[in-house]
Each structure stands twice: as structure tokens, then as C-alpha cells.
Amino acid sequence: MTATPDLSTAEWRKSSYSEGGANDCVEVADNCPGVIPVRDSKQPQGPVLVFGASPWASFLTYVTD
């Protein structure tokens, strides 16, 4: 089992594809070394998905192609 990273200092930003409203907003924190936390902006205290840097890069490559 992997330990959950401390996200208390995470600096969240909304997806550039966000409409700016309350619908379907994804937030990512870029300032967490080695991991990429992702959450739903409508539920900032809710669950966070945490990806390794390499799988996240692969995901971004896939969705941008």
C-alpha cells in the first residue's frame, strides 16, 4: 500500500478546458514532486486521485493526440 501524499500545500488550478462555471471542472496541482493530484472542483474537500508523473504524462499524450 502506498502512503497518501500531504496535499495541504497543493496549489490547485482548473483545467484550461473548464467553462469557468460550475460544470465539469477538473483541478490539478502541479507543485507536488513526483505525483499529480487531480480533483473535482465542485467537491474540493472530496476525494483526490493521485497519479505518478510518468502515467500522467502518458495520459496527457493520449488525450491530446
Image (spheres, helix red, strand yellow):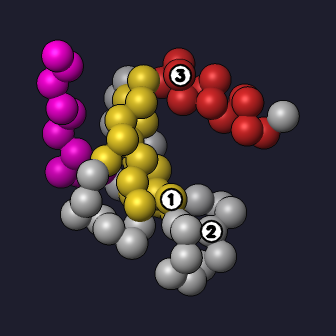
Asked whether 47 or 17 is in front, the reply is 47
**Marks 1 & 2, CB-CB < 8 Å contact:** yes
> Residue 35: percent from the left, percent from the top?
38, 29
Residue underneath mark 2? 18
Q: Say few, some or many: other residues with alpha carbon within 10 Å of mark 1 (under 14 / 14 to 19 / 20 or more).
A: some
Q: Is residue 8 magenta?
A: yes
Q: Amino acid at mark 2?
A: Ser
Q: Amino acid at mark 3?
A: Pro
Asked whether 54 or 33 is in front, the reply is 54
The kind of secondary structure element at disc 3 is helix
Which residues fall within the magenta stretch? 1-10
Labels 1 and 3: the sequence-earlier one: 1
> Residue 27: percent from the left, percent from the top?
46, 57
Dominant secondary structure, magenta: loop
**Marks 1 & 3, CB-CB < 8 Å contact:** no
Q: Residue at x 17, y 39 (%)?
A: 6
The kind of secondary structure element at disc 1 is strand
Residue underneath mark 3? 55
Residue underneath mark 1? 26
> Residue 33: percent from the left, percent from the top?
35, 29
How far apart in space, not on screen, are marks 2 and 3 (Cα)?
A: 22 Å
Labels 2 and 3: the sequence-earlier one: 2
Q: Amino acid at mark 1?
A: Val
* Residue, far right: 65
Q: Say few, some or many: other residues with alpha carbon within 10 Å of mark 2 (under 14 / 14 to 19 / 20 or more).
A: few
Q: Residue at x 53, y 22 (%)?
A: 55
